[in-house]
Image: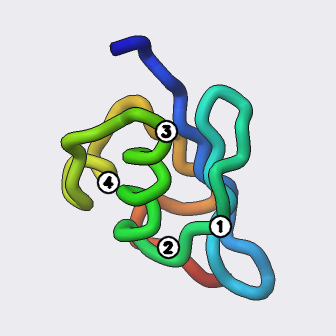
Amino acid sequence: MAVRPVIVSPPSPTGGRRVRVNGEILGLAYDLGDMVKFLRRAGLEGLGEAEVARSRLTEWRGGGPDVWTT
């Protein structure tokens, strides 16, 4: 599997965080469950919420995996 950087933007004013993989916007995540769904669709399968929260492939901007609202 190729390394795919995951960028999670800071929470938006309306809630949720934009998720990108290799520069492609996957959607707006409101929790780790959404992240898991997006990453599976992007081909990063076999990851649960705990793995997504700890993954070194993920760059969390504006707060870590426990921050979803402003």
* SS at circle 4: helix
Q: CA distance from mark 2 to mark 4?
A: 11 Å
* SS at circle 2: loop
- Circle 3 or circle 2, nearest the eye: 3
User: Circles 4 and 1: CB distance less than 8 Å?
Assistant: no
Counting other residues with Cα less than 10 Å from the Cα at mark 3, is it few (<14), some (14-19), or many (20 or more)? some
Mark 2 sits on what residue?
67
Residue 42: numbered disc: 3
Q: CA distance from mark 4 to mark 1?
A: 16 Å
Earlier in the chain: of badge 2 and badge 4, it is 4
User: Which residue is outermost to the bottom?
Assistant: 14
User: Circles 1 and 3: CB distance less than 8 Å?
Assistant: no
Earlier in the chain: of badge 4 and badge 1, it is 1
**Tally of marks:** 4
Residues 26 and 17: in front is 26
* SS at circle 1: strand
Mark 4 sits on what residue?
53
Q: Quadrant of residue 37?
A: bottom left
Identified by mark 1, the residue type is Leu
Q: CA distance from mark 2 to mark 1?
A: 13 Å
Q: Quadrant of the C terminus?
A: bottom right
- Circle 1 or circle 3, nearest the eye: 3
Q: Residue at x 50, y 73 (%)?
A: 67
Earlier in the chain: of badge 2 and badge 1, it is 1
User: Circles 4 and 3: CB distance less than 8 Å?
Assistant: no
Earlier in the chain: of badge 4 and badge 3, it is 3
Mark 1 sits on what residue?
28
Counting other residues with Cα less than 10 Å from the Cα at mark 2, is it few (<14), some (14-19), or many (20 or more)? some
